Amino acid sequence: MSRSTKETSILDRNILKQRSDQVSLSAFSYIYSELVQYHQSRVSNISELEEKLASAGYGVGFKVLELLAYRSRENKRETRIMSILQFISSIAWKALFGKAADSLERSIDHADEYMIFDYNPVTSIYVSAHQSAADAYISGVIAGILEGAGFTATVSAHAVQLEEGESRRSSIGLPVKKDKAVFLVKFSPQILERDTTLER
Amino acid sequence: MAFLDLFIVNKSGGLIHHRSLSEKAPQIGTNEWLRIGSTFHSLHAIAAEASPVRGKIDDGIELIESEGLVLCCFQTRTGIKFVLTAEPGTGYLQKVLKEIYVAYTDCALKDPFYELEMPIRCELFTQAVNDVMSRFGNR
């Protein structure tokens, strides 16, 4: 029996094939701007707004982890801190934003803190004030991925001034920002202990 | 051949942005600017009504030319008016206004913390206007 011509819904598509569909940046900016404004009218201060945006991204993180782990065909899951962070900053970032994160660093002052840098996160390309509040959504996504992978951590977004030598890479047409975004990942002590025991 | 001032008037006639674009621009206080904005808004509307030929919705003052000044206005579909003043003989007025409009849609309208019809305080918008000015040769 021949297959009748019906529209393929998203559920019928092959999950393994990574479609590199392009979405209009303007469309995303408007939808995300509406999400932020929706929450802003229902909170009383900016830290509550950050919490709401982070919880919006949290669910996304779980699902992204499942999908990307399945697509990468790895038979083992990540158990070490550095490997899950590298998964986030390269594979997850590329799938979500089209390019890998700009760098991943370990904090010198605190042993339980790691930082993911992004020069121009997509959630705050057009935001002039409160850039880190707009990036709280991405913090939520990172926190969701980490929680799903079994690492308890608190993630916060910060805006840091660009240093002298760093190039303000920006595509033509996009506003040039003075700050870069830093996602600070702070792991809980049990996770650090577990990581050191695994090292041996 | 220099651009002098830029001002943006919202739908109800209130001034939402003004800045001078060169040192040759006259020194005008903020209150005076507010008055200029609302006066221009009213004149724009009156000119549209008084015109013998009515047509599109964006009727109104487009260009005022005088010996010492050229004033060009661009009205959007939503009633926002972008007004640029320049020395006579300056070219590309319409083009510059369109570029500033693009900067407005990007830096103000896509910013979730910008309230519509309120004064524009977005740093990215100021930077974008600077870029437009440097591209069109204003010092």
Image (spheres, coloured by chain):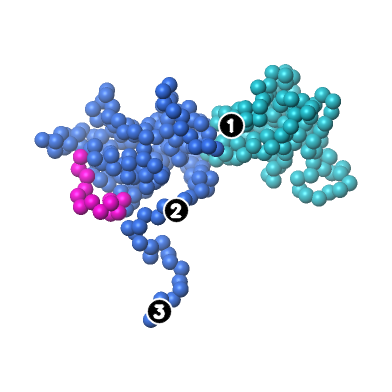
* C-alpha distance separating marks 2 and 1: 29 Å
Asked if disc 3 and disc 1 are in contact, CB closer than 8 Å, the reply is: no
Rendering coords of residue A106 (x, y %): 27, 29
The residue nearer to you, when weighing B40 against A171, is A171
Answer yes or no: is residue A41 visible.
no
> Which residue is denoted by mark 2 in the rendering?
A21
Q: Hey, what amino acid is under mark 2?
A: Asp
In the rendered view, tell whether residue B103 sits above or below residue A73. Answer: above
Rendering coords of residue A125 (x, y %): 49, 37
Name the dominant secondary structure of the magenta segment. loop
Asked if disc 3 and disc 2 are in contact, CB closer than 8 Å, the reply is: no
Q: Residue at x 82, y 43 (%)?
A: B48
On the image, which quarter does residue B133 sit in?
Answer: top right
Visual hue assigned to chain A:
blue
Secondary element type, mark 1: helix
> Which residue is denoted by mark 3 in the rendering?
A2
On the image, which quarter does residue B12 sit in?
Answer: top right
Answer yes or no: is residue A114 visible.
yes
Q: Residue at x 57, y 28 (%)?
A: B127
* C-alpha distance separating marks 3 and 2: 29 Å
Residue ranking furthest to the bottom: A1
Rendering coords of residue B5 (x, y %): 71, 26
* C-alpha distance separating marks 3 and 1: 57 Å
User: As drawn, is A17 to the left or to the right of B127?
Assistant: left
The chain coloured cyan carries which letter? B
The span shown in magenta is A68-80
> Which residue is denoted by mark 1 in the rendering?
B128
Could you classify mark 3 by the number of other residues whose Cα lies within 10 Å: few (under 14), some (14-19), or many (20 or more)? few
Q: Identify the mark at residue B47; answer none if there is no mark.
A: none
Given the image, what chain letter belongs to the residue carrying mark 2? Answer: A
